[in-house]
Image (spheres, helix red, strand yellow):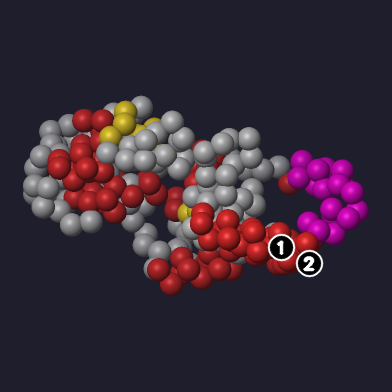
Amino acid sequence: MALEPDLDWRDEALGARIRVALWLRDEVGEGGTFSKRQLREAIKGKEQVDRRMRDLRPAGWVIKSYRDKPSLKPDELYLETVGLPVWDKEYRAAGLRQISAKTRRDVYERDGHVCRRCGIAAGEEYPGEQGSHARLTLGHVVSHKAGSAASPENLITECARCNESVRHLTGVQMDKEKVWDRIRELRNSDRKALFAWMVHKGRVATPAEKVWAMYWQLPAAQRDELRGKLHDLLQS
């Protein structure tokens, strides 16, 4: 992999995404924390510099917020992994396949606003991890490396945690015989449920699960209000 060590994040002739990546690599480093304010102060005069940072994530850069890592303060970010060297010509387009707002909205709605891998809803707290809440994103059924398209058929709703886990498994092929053995171990009722998911190409949510996902998209105060109203309804 040919690197370009002479590139400097201070060079205003470089694109904002490249400058952000170089700044994170050189000034923050893996395992380091920073704030959006520090990023904006470093890369001045560039619009939507926060978005250019987010654009690094599809290229393998793992940048976590307090929602992913409870030990962080609300204004802190954590650079867990430096991904592909987007400053190198070979990788400058890495992760830049754009997903339109309409496609993103359609996929979220199709998937019921829950992670299709673990079933957690947006904003829901991970079991046993107080203060760690799920953030939804979109993953690819077939990875970029295999020439996939950013179409609804190739997109799946994932929480950030599952998305990162799947990324580490890229290129690992599951043994169909092992999967079949697991299917045979299921109870017949579970086999029927699994078959329904296969037919629908996704986990079929119950009406209560669909409302649960919608509920978790509301602000905390509104969730409290609805919980109280439901309590009263059940007591009536």
Give the side of residue 98 with respect to residue 176, left or right.
Answer: left
**Where does the magenta region start and end?**
178-194
Quarter-of-image position of residue 210: bottom right
Q: Inspect this view and state whether residue 157 appears.
A: no
Q: Which residue is drawn at 22% across and 51% down?
A: 49
Q: Which residue is drawn at 53% across and 47% down?
A: 134
Residue 97 at x, y percent in the picture: 37, 59
Q: Is residue 188 in the magenta section?
A: yes
Q: Main secondary structure of the magenta part?
A: helix
Residue position for label 2: 236
Is 15 placed above or below 104 here?
A: above
Residue 3 at x, y percent in the picture: 23, 34
Q: Is residue 23 in the magenta section?
A: no
> How far separated are the C-alphas under marks 2 and 1?
6 Å
Residue 129 at x, y percent in the picture: 58, 35
Q: Are marks 2 and 1 in contact (CB under 8 Å)?
A: yes
Is 121 placed above or below 30 here?
A: below
Residue 53 at x, y percent in the picture: 29, 47
Taking depth in this image into account, of 63 and 71 the one nearest to the observer is: 71
